[in-house]
Image (cartoon, rainbow, N blue to C red):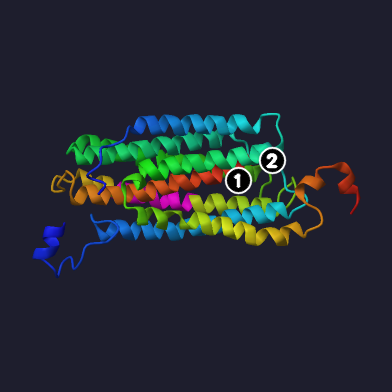
Amino acid sequence: MAEGHRDPNYWLIWLYLFVLTVVEIAVIFMPIAKLVIVIALVALAISKASLVAMYFMHLRFERRTLGLIAVTPLFLGVLLIFLLLPDQAAVEHRTDEALRPAAVGKH
Amino acid sequence: MSEVALSHPAVEPAESPLTPESWGKLGMWIFLVGDAMGFGVLLAGYGAMRYGSADWPVPYDHLGINLTAFMTFLLICSSVTMVKGLEAVKHRNRDLAKMYLALTALGGAIFLGLQAYEWTKLIGEGLKLWGNPWGASLFGTSFFIITGFHGAHVTGGVIYLIVITFLVSRPTTEMGPGWTYNVVEITGLYWHFVDLVWIMVFTFVYLL
């Protein structure tokens, strides 16, 4: 199947990946809320990973079932994060609280 | 492939349903999906430890991202040389394929060299597997385990690529969109996966 498709412009994909990496680094120095930075970074990382999987790994030109198999780890990974969240949310002092001087003095 | 399968049923009993070119490709995909779960667990575990820790250091204050940004760039470049090498195999250009595959292996080797340098520097600054001067001791543990696990994959990939470069260099290896293309494509799948994982590691361990 991969032999049948026309080769995409790989240098263009390279350029996209390069630009997205530069944007990622720029984002962490922006004076915006930490949550926005986190969401932006995760979105950028997923777009970069998708570009690599779709074009470099030819997933775009494969059968759809193979694509479904390929995204299962992503779903299981997200599920795992939500399974772990309740445990960690129960911990009294978290990173963001500890950054405030008052919270450090409490314990 | 299907004609071969019909005339030699004992050699190739059936066509792979998802990847008609070869079973090997399906095999690599399934291996990579399993491997992705391994990295997924490591990164989810990292997130959980960090979220649950009171004094997790801010990574980019201590790890430094200039070098790792360059390492990211290097892996992206080596992914491009990999697909260009595959393209050259398809177009029966052995010299070009050889050059691109060798460059890919070189990119991986430089990446490993830089990682060794980075680890040495950080260990010198006090980042250890069991602790560090900046806060939660798990910061060092998770850093070395995650980047080490990825580095082991790069090491495997560089060895894999060197073997495949030699295979393609051999005059008896037939070029073109057949067996060789398939073998190089499977190598590429592994190599791009290593790049993809680094994109995640760079984001979650260095930038966030």
Q: Quadrant of the C terminus of chain B?
A: top right
The stretch of residues the image draws in magenta is: B151-163
Which element is circle 2 on?
A: helix
Chain to which the residue tagged by mark 2 belongs: A
Q: Residues within 10 Å of mark 1 (few under 14, many from 20)?
A: many
Chain to which the residue tagged by mark 1 belongs: B
Give the residue furthest to the front: A64
Whether residue A9 is situated above or below residue A45 in the rendered picture: above
Q: Which mark, by number, is residue A35? A: 2
Q: Quadrant of the N terminus of chain B?
A: bottom left
**What residue is rendered at 14% in x and 63% in y?**
B5
In the displayed structure image, the side of residue B73 where residue B145 appears, left or right: right
Q: CA distance from mark 2 to mark 1?
A: 16 Å
Which x, y percent locates residue A58?
33, 45
Kind of residue sitting beneath label 2: Leu
How many labels, in total?
A: 2
Q: Nearer the viewer, residue B184 or A24?
A: A24
Query: Which residue is denoted by mark 1 in the rendering?
Result: B205
In the picture, residue B86 is in which quadrant? top left
The magenta stretch spans residue B153: yes
Which x, y percent locates residue B151?
49, 49
In the displayed structure image, the side of residue A85 where residue B25 appears, left or right: left
